[in-house]
Amino acid sequence: MILIHCPYCDERRPEIEFANAGQAHVVRPADPAALSDDEWAAFLFIRANPRGRHHERWRHIHGCGRFFNAVRDTVTDTFEATYKAGEPRA
Amino acid sequence: MSGFRLPTGGRIDRTRPVAFRFDGKEYSGFAGDTLASALLANGVMLFGRSFKYHRARGILAAGTEEPNALVSVNRGPGRATPNLRATGVEIYEGLEAASQNRWPSLGFDVGAINDRFGMFIPAGFYNKTFMWPRSFWERVYEPAIRRMAGLGNAPTDPDPDHYAATYAHCDVLIVGAGPSGIDAALAASTSGRRIILIDEHDEIGGGALGEPELWPWLDRSLADLERVPNLTILTRTTAFGHYHDNFVGAVERLTDHRAPPVDGPREKLWRIRAEAVILAQGAIERPLVFAGNDTPGVMLASAARVYASRYGVAIGKSVVLMASHDSGWHDVFALARTGAEVAAILDVRAIVDPALTARAQALGIEVKLAHSIIDVTGRRAVSGIEFAANDGSRRGCIPCDAVLMAGGWTPSVHLWSHGKGTLKWRDDLGAYVPDAARESVRCVGAGAGNWDFGSGAVVGALPTPKDTARIKAFVDFQNDVTAKDIKLAVREGFRSIEHIKRYTTNGMATDQGKTSNINGLQIASDALSRPVVDIGLTSFRPPYTPQTFGALAGHAKGALFQPLRKTPIDRWAEANGAVFEMVAQWRRARYFPKKGEDMPTAVARECLSVRNAVGMFDASTLGKIEVVGADAAEFLNRMYTNPWKALEPGRCRYGLLLKEDGFITDDGVSARLAPDRFHLTTTTGGAARVLNMMEDYLQTEWPDLDVWLTSTTEEWAVIAVQGPLARDVLAPLVDGIDLSAAAFPHMSVREGTICGVPMRLFRVSFTGELGFEINVPAAFGAAVWEAVHSSGQAFGITPYGTEAMHVLRAEKGFIIVGQDTDGTVTPTDASLDWAIGKKKPDFVGKRSLSRPDIVASGRKQLVGLLTDDPNIVLDEGAQIVADPLQSIPMTMIGHVTSAYRSATLGRSIALALVKGGRGRIGETLHVPMADRVLRVTVADPVFFDRDGARLHV
């Protein structure tokens, strides 16, 4: 079981306290109505599936409840970094 | 001939005899014996029949790697454990063990005919032979094969044992308490760190237990370990898996070694998180591959030495060693010291250390270098060997009753590989050893390839002048895989060891190839004329040895499998005869049958009471979220389809929640209590999901909003009072609220008290009748429920359950999200356009509602269905077709989502999602069932009180 560092609690906790919340840094468009169907479809459905470094959102759902961002290696399943929501892409 | 107990020696307690039974026969051993050592001491050679050919099998090893001697131990009803290695079963007074995979008896086995016809059962035999006809596989072939080729039988009774579980944390975890593990523990102990030392055997010492000259060292080390603070030693504990971040799973066997009855948990699961892991798992000796190497009496050389020195058991009177490695020579020298006659030493190598040959000569042992065994005589026990020089010349025979194999050593890298440590091949060892670690873990001792057993040659199958296509030289003893099978796989085109393994099943038995992987690899390498490293190595995966489901499940079974959520009113419902159903983790009253009532009768009575008088319903499971903050209305406005900003305090609104893809995900009535405070409700099953979704948007998309979300689901007990007389029931109990229609209209909320308890009273209806939902703090829920119930008696109040609630709402065409919707239904599909705020520039999911496929025609829409026969209730989930006479597979145009018998309407009703449904109202469609086709008419989904007159009274 992986240990994940929660940037808000500043502790490494077992993964069962956390929930994955999909790819990170996918920003909801400020004015969805201004988007074409293709642009909106891309926002809705198109996600990265990298082999290696992947930016993800996680939630410390059974802890502080905060969403945060993480860089995880999809090959080794190890976390390179976790950082607070709103902080620049690691 | 066969094994016997030596007059002296061993770590057994000869003052404590132990009686036990094997296949119904009485035997006696000593405390400290394993089932294997005790039976060997009793002269038993035959331990089981092999998996495929039903060949007689004896003991190969002395430890965990034993592939042959699998037994079932019966400790009473529900306590039968199959597939235990006899080498790991400690005997106790009254032990009942049995051999496996034999019929009718171990000595005479009908399936042994397979051995004679073995040429017809090559690798891939099952795949090739039982392909056709396809339908025969499940009903004919598989049951027959399972009867013939089987391991032990799983118990059929429920397991009466219980299992403990614990977490542990330490600085250093050491797996394996042989000399290397003990040294590592003592070395780590100087710093005061927390140490856990695990060993799978009943006493620590590992390989040292088989070497009496190390016993004084072992005693001293044990004394040293006892003085170490913060050291935990776990014996009879198997570390079965090494996971991320040095998380190690281990199972401690607590009671299986003691005579029943025993108290306490049977096993204990340890979840250990270690700062550093040291793997000291040792190495496993490899068998050699030659014809007849599976005959009972053929054994690993190191195992014979362990039986003699640890258990005081000689495995035969006259032994022959077949070696490719120096270690075997040392083993037979040790055996000679216990009085064994060593008939000969054969070594496949032409040149060995002269010190070894000199020693053999001094002991009077005949030595044949560059020779190999080419056959073993005796079927159920060794009676001799046939040998030849490596070039096939100088054949001869030697009578003996035991054959020892010394094929070199394979480091146990199982846990290392679980932790994704890489391996490197060492030609000199003919084995993979640990290379680079990913975790904070290191290997020590023999497990790292560091041993003082001398050196050896690496051979696949031993050379033989015989036709290799006609002999059975076993590689995987448990799965009956021979050298011939591996060569056949190569001939048939398999190149990767991953494929060869699966085709031949080499290494796929319960022992995961502990004794067979490397030999199989070497033979494949020889057959392909390619180096071993090019062929690959199969992955080791947890568990290291088979573990019980009981230990892994622990307490998480039966009532403790998952939490059961009960409302404050659950106890009343139970006392009043409710029949319950599960809704997510909630237990909810489904209906309240009176004496002699069946479910349809009770539900009809409950429904009619609500329509004609008044009913009460426990709605406490509704999800509830308190939304507070200056931007609360703005937040809800962005989340829900509906407009919220203009909603006045004291008013309620039906909220429809979409996902960003435009599909309905939840709904519920919510109330504005104050400009900055809302009381939200969600569906029972959706509460956690909705809160998570709202937190997501609030934290990550709109962190600037001043809003706080709090789950209040379990803070409030909710009592729905519904029916024309609802107001009359409440009036005497409520203070501080004007209940009149003018002062308290439909879809509004008031705060006051009921029975003196603070209350939020909603005037809402999920039944279509005049209705109220009483929200009181959970602690008062039961008391208020009882007060309403007794006050309502004068009006004939009737408690109703979820089934009546479903019928009542379906009569009104109210959807249940998740039943009438399935994640592909838009507000328009469900005829809920009215709930969309037309003037809102944006809300979650709005943009998707104009996607081309969402606005396309022919989407499935929610409609009502009326069966031609009013007494037939459609099956929920039944498919709908336009033309019942079309050929199969028919074109399905929709499905039934809800169907009930409506007492109010005196007929059945149904809701359905049908392609272009709203344009089909009045049309006849068909529902094909297994035995007939039902005709239905498409109808408006609101079956009762279409203009809502009953709500506004």
Image: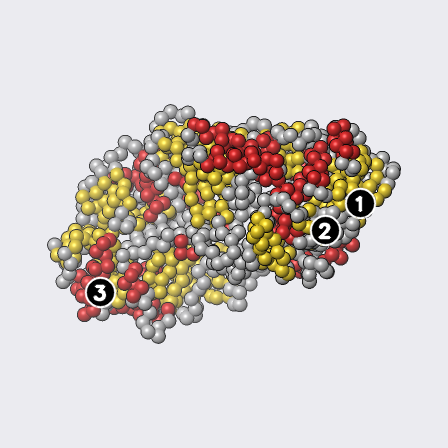
**Label 1 crowd (10 A; few <14 / some 14-19 / many >=20):** many
Residue named by callout 2: B2
Q: CA distance from mark 2 to mark 1?
A: 15 Å
Label ID, residue B385: 1
The residue nearer to you, when weighing B455 against B251, is: B455
The quarter of the picture where the C terminus of chain B appears is bottom left
Label ID, residue B832: none
Q: Residue at x 44, y 33 (%)?
A: B228
Element type at mark 3: helix
Q: Is A1 positioned to the left or the right of B530 in the image?
A: left
Mark 2 or 1: the one toward you = 2
Co-location on one chain, circles 1 and 3: yes
| Residue B782, image quadrant | bottom left
Q: Earlier in the sequence, mark 1 or mark 3?
A: 1
Q: Is residue B430 above or below residue B813?
A: above
Tell me, yes or no, if residue B350 can be seen here. Answer: yes
Q: CA distance from mark 1 to mark 3?
A: 90 Å
Element type at mark 1: strand
Mark 2 or 3: the one toward you = 2
Instruction: Please state which amino acid type lies under the numbered disc 3.
Output: His
| Residue B739, image quadrant | bottom left
Q: Is residue B757 above or below residue A50?
A: below
The residue nearer to you, when weighing B181 against A83, is: B181
Co-location on one chain, circles 2 and 1: yes
Instruction: Please state which amino acid type lies under the numbered disc 2.
Output: Ser
Q: Earlier in the sequence, mark 2 or mark 3?
A: 2
Q: Chain of mark 1?
A: B
Residue named by callout 3: B789
Residue B377's spot in the image, x, y percent?
80, 49
